[in-house]
């Protein structure tokens, strides 16, 4: 399955959730599904989406928090999985799109094929983990994941490759931070 097809399915099911997307092509895929003020797109900081999502989940326990991550980003910060598992926020939902590549920097291979990230998450203390290997399974697993408590992860095996001419995030990092603060807390700057 194509990564952007899986992104579209998940994005359609998370409306209203505070959402953090990792840097690179995955964030751009989410951006192209239609921007929302409760979406924060990492720009240039690899591996930190789950840490930001964890902070949101802990400080906003009444709101659903969703993280869109790639396998390269998760591998960059494996300690994030341990922190999420130990802290155990029930409102934290982690969607990992695993193409076995660093898609934004030239398609170099990751080691995700040798390190089953969904199993690592389970060992780290995630309450529930799911894996989807085809597009139909993504829709079913997303519903099941969002229907229960977290921390929970859905790892989706997606094909390497990027969309042609995918648009870039057009909001500045400062504006992304401000609008996420407003979406999370309601406080205006």
Image (spheres, rainbow, N blue to C red):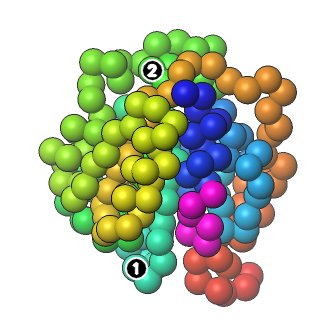
Residue sitting at x 49%, y 49%: 139
**Percent x, y of residue 16:** 61, 72
Q: Using the image as rendered, state which of residue 161 and residue 80 is in the foreground.
A: 161
What residue did someone put label 1 on?
A: 61
The secondary element bearing badge 2 is classed as loop
Residue 59 location in percent, x, y? 43, 77
Q: Which mark is residue 33?
A: none
Is residue 167 positioned above or below 13 on the image? Answer: above
Residue 134 screen position, x and y as percent? 46, 32
- Mark 2 highlights which residue? 100
- Looking at the picture, tell me which residue is in the foreground, 62 or 159: 159
Measure the C-alpha gap from mark 2 to mark 1.
32 Å
Residue 137 sits in which quadrant? top left
Secondary structure of the residue carrying tag 1 is loop
Quadrant in the picture for residue 22: top right
In-front residue for pair 162/10: 10
Residue at the outermost left position: 123
Residues rendered magenta in the picture: 12-17
Q: Is residue 122 left or right of residue 171?
A: left
User: Which of the two discs, 2 and 1, labels the residue nearer the N terminus?
Assistant: 1
């Amino acid at each position: 399955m194509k990564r952007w097809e899986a992104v579209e399915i998940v994005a359609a099911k998370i409306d209203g959730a505070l959402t953090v997307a990792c840097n690179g092509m995955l964030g751009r895929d989410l951006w192209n599904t239609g921007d929302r003020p409760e979406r924060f797109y990492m720009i240039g900081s690899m591996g930190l989406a789950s840490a930001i999502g964890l902070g949101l989940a802990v400080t906003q326990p009444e709101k659903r928090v969703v993280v869109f991550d790639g396998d390269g980003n998760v591998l960059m910060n494996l300690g994030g999985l341990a922190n999420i598992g130990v802290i155990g926020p029930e409102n934290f939902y982690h969607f990992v799109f695993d193409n076995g590549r660093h898609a934004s920097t030239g398609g170099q291979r990751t080691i995700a094929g040798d390190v089953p990230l969904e199993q690592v998450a389970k060992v780290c203390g995630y309450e529930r983990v799911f894996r989807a290997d085809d597009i139909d399974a993504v829709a079913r697993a997303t519903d099941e994941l969002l229907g229960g408590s977290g921390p929970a992860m859905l790892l989706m095996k997606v094909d390497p490759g990027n969309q042609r001419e995918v648009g870039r995030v057009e909001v500045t990092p400062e504006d992304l931070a401000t609008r996420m603060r407003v979406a999370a807390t309601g406080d205006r700057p």
